[in-house]
Image (tube, helix red, strand yellow):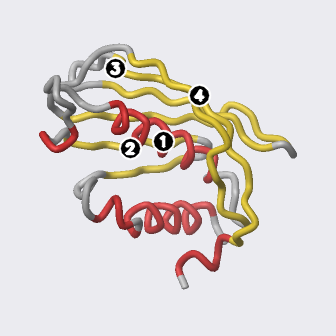
Amino acid sequence: MSKTDHYDFLIKLFHSAPINKTIFAGSEMSLADGEAIYELTVKEEFFHGGEAMHGAIYFKLLDDAAYFACATHVDDYFLVTKSYQIEFVRPVMGGRLIAKGKLLKADEDGFIASSEILNEDGKVVGKGEGIFVKSRKPMPQLTE
């Protein structure tokens, strides 16, 4: 499979996830070698009682951006998140967010990637780093 075909497969996989068809409908993903960009418009449904975006949404953006950056280097098995550490930098009350993921290291023990979320003003609102490992589920079986 060519890199372009692999990236197209991963983007299709991203959009096929039920959570991305419903809660995160309208989100966009683009990929390059060891990099991912995840764009999302903030909805009121993402807010906690303090009228700012809930930490679960930060996690989703950061984890997916880092995950898909790693997945650009894996075409045999589905990856899973082993761990992910987040730093909340500033609250989000609306607008469009861009999460950028970058593969930092790949070896036999897994993959390490970082990601950050930028608001419309280009300011970092959250960042983190995670470890991703191959699962036992072969990649081609995911779309069957």
Side of 22 where 89 appears, left or right: right
Which kind of residue does numbered mark 1 sit on?
Ala
Which class describes the residues within 10 Å of circle 2: few (<14), some (14-19), or many (20+)?
many
Q: Secondary structure at mark 3?
A: strand
Which kind of residue does numbered mark 4 sit on?
Glu
Question: Which residue corresponds to mark 4?
Answer: 129
Identify which residue is drawn at 73% across, 49% down: 133
> Mark 3 or mark 2, which is nearer the start of the sequence?
2
- For marks 2 and 4, give the CA distance: 16 Å
Which kind of residue does numbered mark 3 sit on?
Val
Identify which residue is drawn at 38% across, 28% down: 117
Where residue 52 sits: x, y (%)? Answer: 19, 26
Which kind of residue does numbered mark 2 sit on?
Tyr
Question: Which residue corresponds to mark 1?
Answer: 65
* Placement of 115 over or under 16, stated as above or below: above
Q: Secondary structure at mark 1?
A: helix
* Placement of 25 over or under 85, stated as above or below: below
Where residue 96 sits: x, y (%)? Answer: 21, 35
> Mark 4 or mark 2, which is nearer the start of the sequence?
2
Q: Nearer the viewer, residue 106 or 61?
A: 61
Q: Quadrant of the C terminus?
A: bottom right
Which class describes the residues within 10 Å of circle 4: few (<14), some (14-19), or many (20+)?
many
The reply to whether callout 4 and callout 1 are in contact (CB within 8 Å) is no
Q: Nearer the viewer, mark 4 or mark 1?
A: 4
Question: Which residue corresponds to mark 3?
Answer: 125
Side of 40 where 71 appears, left or right: right
- For marks 2 and 1, give the CA distance: 6 Å
Where residue 89 sits: x, y (%)? Answer: 37, 14
Question: Which residue corresponds to mark 2?
Answer: 38
> Mark 1 or mark 2, which is nearer the start of the sequence?
2
The reply to whether callout 1 and callout 3 are in contact (CB within 8 Å) is no
Identify which residue is drawn at 59% across, 65% down: 6
